[in-house]
């Protein structure tokens, strides 16, 4: 009922290969998590810069030379659109990273079986 030495060796080889693949997948997941966190921080910084720019442009537009204009013209709209596009890009990237992380986790679980 026991296994032959060659079968045992093959099983150990498969186990070692599975562990190596699992380790690689875990490294990829860690990299994706770090990348995702970095992109989120980057978006926050860029959003703050854009908001500051919008606030400053509104102040300049509502000043004496602006004639009481409240900064609702095309420059603000362009900034809002750019900010929205940046946020959409980040959300898409974060979603992709989440899906990749889930796929890697599924592969890891499959390898463990």
Image (tube, rainbow, N blue to C red):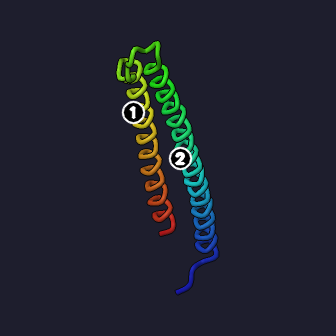
Q: Observer-nearest residue: 106 or 56?
A: 56
Q: Nearer the viewer, mark 1 or mark 2?
A: 1
Q: Residues within 10 Å of mark 1 (few under 14, many from 20)?
A: few
Q: Earlier in the sequence, mark 1 or mark 2?
A: 2
**Relative height, residue 81 to residue 9 (above, below):** above
Residue 13: image location, x then y, percent: 62, 65
Please state if 4 lies on the left or on the right of 84 as rendered.
Answer: right
Residue at the outermost bottom position: 1
Looking at the rendered structure, the secondary structure element under dot 1 is helix
- Residue at (46%, 12%) from the top-left corner? 65
Quarter of the view holding residue 10: bottom right
Quarter of the view holding residue 5: bottom right
- Residue at (43%, 37%) from the top-left corner? 87
Q: In the rendered image, which residue does mark 2 sit on?
A: 36
Residue 33: image location, x then y, percent: 55, 52
Looking at the rendered structure, the secondary structure element under dot 2 is helix
Q: Residues within 10 Å of mark 2 (few under 14, many from 20)?
A: many
Residue 21: image location, x then y, percent: 58, 57
Q: In the rendered image, which residue does mark 1 sit on?
A: 84
- Residue at (41%, 46%) from the top-left corner? 95
Please state if 41 lies on the left or on the right of 57 as rendered.
Answer: right
Please state if 71 lies on the left or on the right of 57 as rendered.
Answer: left
- Residue at (63%, 65%) from the top-left corner? 16
Residue 108: image location, x then y, percent: 50, 61
Q: Observer-nearest residue: 8 or 100?
A: 100
């Amino acid at each position: 009922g026991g296994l032959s030495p060659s079968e045992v060796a093959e099983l150990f080889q498969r186990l070692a290969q599975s562990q190596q693949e699992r380790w690689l997948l875990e490294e990829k997941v860690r990299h994706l998590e770090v990348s995702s966190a970095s992109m989120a921080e980057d978006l926050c910084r860029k959003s703050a810069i854009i908001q500051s720019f919008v606030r400053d442009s509104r102040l300049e537009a509502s000043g004496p030379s602006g004639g009481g204009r409240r900064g609702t013209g095309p420059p603000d709209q362009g900034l809002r659109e750019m900010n929205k596009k940046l946020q959409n890009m980040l959300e898409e990237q974060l979603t992709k990273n989440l899906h990749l992380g889930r796929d890697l986790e599924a592969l890891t679980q499959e390898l463990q079986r």
